[in-house]
Image (spheres, grey):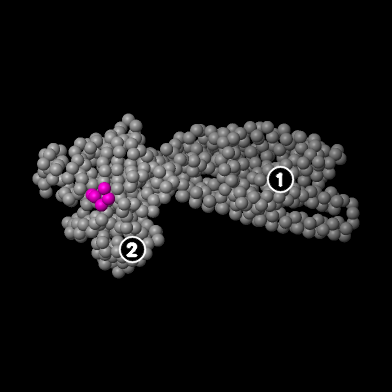
Amino acid sequence: MIDDNLQVKLSQRQALYYFRRVLGEARDKRWLIALCLLGSLLEAGVEVRLPQVMASGIDQFMISQADGARRMDGLMHLGMVYLLLVLTASLLGFLLTLGFNRVGQLVVERLRNHLFEHLHRLPISYFDGNPVGRLVTRVANDTGTLSEFFTGVVANLLCDLLKLLVLLGALFWASPRLTLSVLILAPPALLASVLFQRANTRVNREIRRLLAQLNAFIQENLQGLSTLKSFTAEARMQKDFDRQNTEYLGVEMRLVYLYMLFRPLFGTISMLSLAIILWVGGWQVTTGQISLGTLVMFVFYLKMLFAPLDDLAERFNVLQSAAVAAERLFLILDAEPEPQGGLELKSCQGRIEFRDVHFAYDPQKPVLQGVSFVLEPGQKLALVGATGSGKTTVTALLQRLYPLTQGEILLDGVDIRSIQVDSLRRQFGIIQQELFLFRATLRHNVTLYRNVSEAALTEAVRISRAARVLEAHPDGLDRKLGERGNQLSQGERQLVSFARALVDDPAVLIMDEATASIDSLTEEAIQEALQDLLVGRTAILVAHRLSTIQHCDQILLLEQGQVVERGTHRELMELDGAYANLVRHQLEKA
């Protein structure tokens, strides 16, 4: 399960570990990264040269005793050199930004693809413990943060670091004493940076946690909006949202306060450094130790030295956010995918056997306890029982949506754990009570983007009686459905579910409460479709209406995960036990 309350401080070692993994996505672009690093070094060298050109102009021509024509020629020559250096630095900066952004966007694209693919490979149990809204935040927001990291930090940070090294060398070369005087303020500046980094890390992790909660809350409320309106719960949910939103605002303001403290502090240090240069450097100029041009060069170097430090707060923020985002993304990518199995099953006869199957979602609360049955090819099995008795769990285990706790499930005599999971699931046609429809055409909702021939699609529509859904709209199969296909009635949705299950002509049908909520107008079409659906196929029916299962070859009555009665409808009615009582109860209600 994803934990939003991750450790407060992400160590530098951990951050470097995650950044290495992120950059590992760009292994095939190492040549581009190497070119960008070389370009960063060249850009740093060019920018450091600019104040030196200005210093030469001051010392050699502005305050020199040379004649006016020579001075003007010299200044024009230096001006052209300066302009050429500026254009070179601008071109290098453009190319570096383009190169680093190319690498960054490629990394983000690959991470998104890996995440999307990996999420489909994770077991259903993973999603039971992780809200969808939280996962959406990971894929959308956290990959966006990594994109910002490459866009706003990587290129500038590398160039700035190289520039600082070149600057320090140039400063010591020009005047060691003046450089040491300025560097007196380096320890407090570094201390302030460390303190800011630690505080910024804590606040950013809290912001990420609260944002994930807020997104999950919004998504859940929008998905359940009709329910909230029906029960007039909007005001209560608004109150809960206001509380979470206010908490998020408080943490965001803590980040603002950090910036308000950090930026003025660096501004003060910068001004103090300038005062030291004017004091010490001015004295050196008057005593002839350095030239006026050198003093001016120091002032420009000081600005170049503190410019990256002035942006350090924002870059720390992006760096820490990127490190936390990378950590959270790799927590998903490192989650264990569901076992795939190795045996490819191209077809099956449809013989199903459960041998002493035990299962529990929570080890303390068993759901199935010793369930056993055999279903021969072409036979029909009905599962009945109260809510929570384990009926749907039986069908989920057959599809390997969850791992067995104990026992075996065999398909055509082969343990399903040894079968390649995709080829296993292709043998089943699933008809769900709550059909999920995607924002796509009816054709894509029936085929789920599989390669299905037009003949197979037409046959599935015919047998399922879904033609009535197509006839209701001029676009037919190309009719576009909106959010979750809410414009279809429950009966129409059920017919689409039948067509989806039949389109691959499966050997086994699994119907989970398939006729639980059908309107009376569609009842006749549903019953006709069911008769054709079941012909020649093994079927497991999770029964809601007991009148629909009277012709099943076998009926299992489950209570608290155990089979308490089994047999045909006639046998169970003659037994006059719990099943017979259920049938009589439904007849009385009818």
Percent of width and height locating residue 64: 87, 51
Residue lying farthest top?
364
Residue 575 falls in which quadrant of the image? top left
Q: Residue at x 80, y 44 (%)?
A: 294
Specify whether residue 58 is painted magenta.
no
| Left or right: 549 as drawn, with respect to 222 | left
Which residue is at the front of the view, 215 or 333? 333
Other residues around mark 2 within 10 Å, as few (<14) / some (14–19) / many (≥20): some
| Amino acid type at mark 2 | Ala
| Amino acid type at mark 1 | Lys
Residue lying farthest bottom?
474
Which residue is at the front of the view, 500 or 82? 500
Magenta stretch bounds = 376-380
Q: Residue at x 78, y 59 (%)?
A: 80
The local secondary structure at tag 2 comes to: helix
The local secondary structure at tag 1 comes to: helix
Which residue is at the front of the view, 167 or 252? 167
For disc 1, the marked residue is 163
For disc 2, the marked residue is 456
Q: Is residue 523 visible?
A: yes
Q: Is residue 116 above or below residue 453?
A: above
The prevailing secondary structure element of the residues shown in magenta is loop
